[in-house]
Amino acid sequence: MNGLTEMGLALTGVAPVAALFAAGKARACEDAAPPRWLMSCGRGLALAGALLQLLLAIAISGPMAGTVLVLTAWMVCGSLFVPLVNAWPALTFRFSAALTATGALLALAGTLA
């Protein structure tokens, strides 16, 4: 596995982190105004996203490296997401989907290369 694949897999954790945040009761979440379905289904979507990310990482890099990659990605995405969503709530939610799609494309390109 190359760095492009690892970076792509790490970026795929951005949308589940945003979904988990939308399901919470944070003040910045009200400012971001996520859709109601995301607020009600956010925890389930975050769990599904994390499991999918974990399965892809394990399939590509093995059980230990894949698990460490996903845990590290969630810690980094979460620690960066909180200050960003506090500063720019709506913009952060909009870009989380774009970053996840970019990460999926990077992971695919790294796997095929």
Image (tube, rainbow, N blue to C red):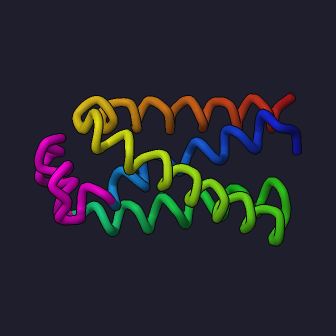
Residue closest to the eye, 87 or 94: 87
Q: Quadrant of the N terminus?
A: top right
Question: What residue is rendered at 63% in x and 30% in y?
Answer: 105
Question: What residue is rendered at 82% in x and 32% in y?
Answer: 112
Residue 33 counted in the magenta span: yes
Residue closest to the eye, 76 or 113: 76
The picture quadrant where one finds residue 47 is: bottom left
Is 3 on the left or on the right of 68, as rendered? right
Image coords of residue 111 (percent x, y): 80, 38
Image coords of residue 94 (percent x, y): 31, 31
Residue 28 counted in the magenta span: yes
Image coords of residue 81 (percent x, y): 42, 47
Identify whether 99 is placed above or below 29.
above
Question: What residue is rendered at 25% in x and 55% in y?
Answer: 22
Is 58 on the left or on the right of 103, as rendered? right
Image coords of residue 40 (percent x, y): 17, 63
Identify whether 39 is placed above or below 34.
below
Q: Quadrant of the C terminus?
A: top right
The picture quadrant where one finds residue 90 is: top left
Residue range (magenta): 21-40
Is 19 on the left or on the right of 2, as rendered? left
